[in-house]
Amino acid sequence: MSNARSLARQLAVQAIYQWQIAGQDLIDIQKQFAEEHNLKKVDKKYFRELLQNIPKCIDDLDRHTSSLLDRNIEEVDPIERAIIRIGTYELDRRLDVPVKVVINESVELAKKFGADQSHKYVNGILDGVAKKLRSAELNKR
């Protein structure tokens, strides 16, 4: 399941990136990804959840990161922005996904899709979000 979910996150980064850049309709993006990608090994339900729900709560997600960013969220590289928003969504709305998993997955996505050192930036931002939103979970470690 976790590999299927990792694949869902990878596609979600690309789909949310596309939405951020082109402002395309989410249903159209979802259809396009279904046509262009082999989704057999992907957690399709999770991909749809991320793609449909992140834009709906974008202001809340961005509020969680605004004090942690060194610039306005819209000035952050679009790939990093998509990864930060996915990670923040999971930290805020998917309490079933452990903090460590969210951050590790986000760092791996940044290494795969982002600029050279973007994984360090993503890690720092999401670590700060986790401290705000999941302090109880972090204190149990």
Image: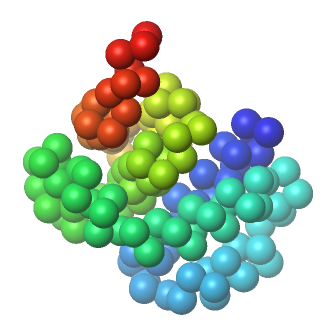
**Foreground residue, 5 or 76?**
5
* Colour pattern of the rendering: rainbow
Check the picture and name the quadrant holding the C terminus: top left
**Foreground residue, 81 or 135?**
135
In which image quadrant can residue 34 be found?
A: bottom right
Residue 42 against residue 20 in the figure, above or below: above
Q: Is residue 133 left or right of residue 3?
A: left
**Foreground residue, 13 or 63?**
63
Residue 25: percent from the left, percent from the top?
Answer: 54, 89
Q: Going by the picture, which residue comes out furthest to the right?
A: 40
Q: At 37% across and 33% down in the image, what residue appears?
A: 134
Q: At 60% across and 51% down in the image, what residue appears?
A: 9
Q: At 47% across and 66% down in the image, what residue appears?
A: 54
Residue 84: percent from the left, percent from the top?
Answer: 37, 50
> Residue 15, can we see it?
no
Residue 26 against residue 39 in the figure, above or below: below
Q: At 22% across and 67% down in the image, what residue appears?
A: 74
Residue 96 against residue 45 in the figure, above or below: above
Q: Going by the picture, which residue comes out furthest to the top?
A: 141
> Residue 125, can we see it?
yes
Residue 121: percent from the left, percent from the top?
Answer: 27, 38
Q: Going by the picture, which residue comes out furthest to the front?
A: 136
